[in-house]
Image: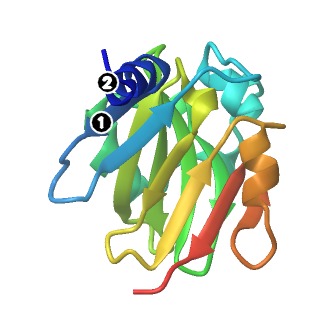
Amino acid sequence: MDLLSLGAEVMHRKWKIAVTVVAVAGVSVAAVAATSPSENAVEKALDIVPAMGVQQQVSDRLPEAASKTFSPTGIDLASVRLVGKTTNAQYFAAAMGTDQICIVTAGHDGSGQMMGCTFVKGFEGYGLRVANPDKSEEAWLVVPGSTQAAAASDPGKWDATASNFLVKETSR
């Protein structure tokens, strides 16, 4: 086996790619997360969004229109927590079953805009990063206290709306 083949085999074993794509009533829904072994292994959505362990507040609930759009996907509406707001959108984290976590985006008018999900297992390697349909804004959910949270909070690039949720405006 040559060095190139050996390197490809090592990378194949070290990295996994999880992709979830769902289409709901014409709404964009996509996410890609690369994972690798890391220091902050997670086992459930609560490890990523600790607020899921306390009672849901009124502000954590999806707006009615977004709830109608995304409830057929199987997200647990009781697990939904608001993780950030920008001038363009409201961002919510939600569990889907016991093995996935999602970012659900709603417009300020309450409409459901997009949803991206990834598996909880391996989440610590990269987190969950999504972009809005026109690619003018990106959002990134990472493990609290992780190296990604520290690196991504570089001023001028990402704004932390929570300790482990970051957003940035991108050029079109």
Residue 110 placed where, x, y %? 44, 66
Q: Is residue 4 left or right of residue 61?
A: left
Q: Residue 10 carries which label?
A: none
Numbered label attached to residue 20: 1
The x and y percentages for residue 95 are 50, 28
- Where residue 56 sits, quadrant-wise, is top right
| Quarter assignment of residue 18 | top left
Q: Which residue lies furthest to the bottom in this view?
A: 172
Q: Which residue is drawn at 52% across and 17% down?
A: 121
Q: Furthest-front residue in view?
A: 2
Out of 68 and 169, give the one closest to the viewer.
Answer: 169
Whichever of labels 1 and 2 marks the residue nearer the N terminus, that label is 2
Which residue is under mark 2? Answer: 5
Neighbour tally class for label 2: few under 14, some 14-19, many 20 plus, Cα within 10 Å: few
**Viewer-proximal residue, 66 or 39?**
39
Q: Position of residue 119 (x, y in %)?
A: 45, 25
Total marks shown come to 2
Q: Which of marks 1 and 2 is in front?
A: 2
Q: Which amino acid does label 1 sit on?
A: Thr
Q: Is residue 76 above or below residue 136?
A: above
Say what amino acid the circle numbered 2 marks.
Ser
* In the image, residue 69 above or below residue 78: below
Check disc 2 and report its element: helix, strand or loop. helix
- Identify the image quadrant of residue 97: top left
Question: What crowding class fits label 1: few (fewer than 14 Cα within 10 Å), some (14-19), or many (20 or more)?
Answer: some
Camera-side residue of 24 and 55 = 24
Residue shown at 29%/51% (left/top)? 29
**Image coords of residue 148 (percent x, y):** 72, 45
Measuring 68% from the left and 30% from the top, which residue is drawn there?
A: 48
